[in-house]
Each structure stands twice: as C-alpha cells, then as structure tokens.
Image (cartoon, grey):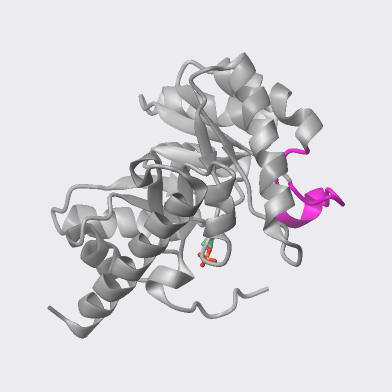
Amino acid sequence: MSDRTAELAASLAALRDRIVRGCEAAGRDPASVTLVAVTKTFPASDVRALLDLGVADFGENRDQDARDKVAALREAGVPQPRWHFVGRLQRNKATSVAGYADVVHSVDRAQLAESLGAAATRRDRTVTALVQVNLDEAADRAGRGGAVPAEVAQVAAAVAAQPALVLGGVMAVAPLSADPGPAFARLAETAAAVRADHPAAQWISAGMSGDLEAALQHGATHVRVGTALLGGRPPPLG
Ligand SMILES: *Cc1c(COP(=O)(O)O)cnc(C)c1O
C-alpha cells in the first residue's frame, strides 16, 4: 500500500466513523446515507485508490477536470464509479456533463433542466437530477447558486417533465458563516414539499466536511465530502 493509499484509508475510516456516529445521534440507519467523495483538484490516482477502498460515488465540480478523470480511468481499464456533478453548470456544458454524469446536483433553473434533459436524450443516457436550493437568507443568486425556495417546485416540475432525467430530490450548500442547522432545517422542509409532488424524489444532498453532522440531523441522504477525506485544496483561482 502506498503512503497516499494508507493516508486515504485512514481518513476514510475516520470519516465513515463520523457518519456512523452522526447517524446514531440522529437516530438514523447509516445505510441510508451515501458518501460522495468530492475529488475536485485531486488526481485520478486518488479516485482509483478510493475505488479500491470501496468508495463508489465521486463528485466533481468542473466539467474539464471530471472528463480528465473519466478518461484516465477508461485508459486504465477501470470500471467507472457513479459520477456526481456538483458544481455550477452552464447550459453549454450540459451535453458534455450528460455524457458521463450519473447525477447532477446543481439544477437550479427550468432552462437548465431542459438543456440537460435534451443532452441526456441525445446521448442516450438517463441522468438523476437534483434541484439545488439556495439556503442563504439573503438569497444571493449570483453567489452560491441554487433556486430560491419559492422557485423550487417549478424547477422540480421542469426536471420531472424531461424523459431522460429522473428527479432525485434536492441539494444545498449551507451558508458560509452561520449555524448550518436552521438552513438544513429549511432544506428538509423544501425536500418534503418536493416529495409531496414527486414521491420518488427522496434524496437530500447536504453536508460537507465541516457540517455533515448537522446535515444528518436534518435528513441528508448524500453527504459530499472533500477535505476531510482527501486533505486541503489550494484556494481556487479567481
Ligand atoms: C467542494 C465541494 C464539496 C466538498 O467540500 P469539503 O468542504 O471539502 O468537504 C461539497 N459540495 C460541493 C458543491 C463542493 O463544491
């Protein structure tokens, strides 16, 4: 085992333990939670190591980086994991993303649902789509992305209308500087409203390295973890 693989094995064990304890505190079954390893900025060799350690779901936030990793695994003859696209998505990238992503967590407007649905149809793929919800009280759309809660039903309906998309549920990133609990509570309410219209849309993608326990308290089914698993990232450019 390489040093890096040993390091990843140790942080994966610690993370799985955190998820189990977070579920216990929330009175939930850990089997109801999926870990999505967010490998952005880390090399394809880390994806391979985590695959060998039993991680099945991987998240990326930039199309080009995701494509590079998909290609690296393909060249190595390694079966693809489930790929989750978790970043801001421009409509002109929909065709590319629909080519490899099994799940897109960041659908936040009806037009994007239409573009992604058309792209998935063209590429003969079925893509699970989550409605990204903006949990910022200030609802700063330019900032972190996401539909404001009042728009969510409309975006969910636009996803559900696309034959090549499956509406999985909702996703959110907690506001940066606040206690994430109330924000995740609002997300849980939004998720329940979506389920009232679309009973199969059961996913709540919430919780990252710093706040996954709070997300588990509020029903997260998918936690997206980067730093706690892979280590620190260099700050993004721009
Ligand atoms: C980077 C990223 C994560 C992982 O964040 P960490 O704090 O490193 O765990 C989760 N979700 C999204 C949308 C991200 O961009």
User: Which corner quadrant holds the C terminus?
Assistant: bottom right
Q: Is residue 9 magenta?
A: no
Main secondary structure along the magenta-highlighted residues:
loop
Horizontal side, residue 25 vs residue 132: left or right? left
Horizontal side, residue 203 vs residue 185: left or right? left
In the image, which residues are magenta?
Answer: 135-148
Question: Which residue is at a point 47% across and 71% down the rendered structure image?
Answer: 227
Q: In this view, which residue lies farthest toward the bottom? A: 3
Report the front residue among 69 and 31.
31
Question: Which residue is at a point 26% across and 63% down the rendered structure image?
Answer: 50
Report the front residue among 156 and 74.
156
Horizontal side, residue 162 vs residue 100: left or right? right
Residue 145, position as x, y percentages in the image = 71, 49
Question: Which residue is at a point 83% across and 48% down the rendered structure image?
Answer: 139
Q: Quadrant of residue 107?
A: top right
Residue 118, position as x, y percentages in the image = 52, 24
Residue 39, position as x, y percentages in the image = 40, 63
User: Which corner quadrant holds the N terminus?
Assistant: bottom left
121 in relation to 70, above or below: above
Is residue 133 something that shows in the picture?
no
42 in relation to 76, above or below: below
Residue 37, position as x, y percentages in the image = 39, 58
Is residue 200 something that shows in the picture?
yes
Q: Is residue 139 magenta?
A: yes
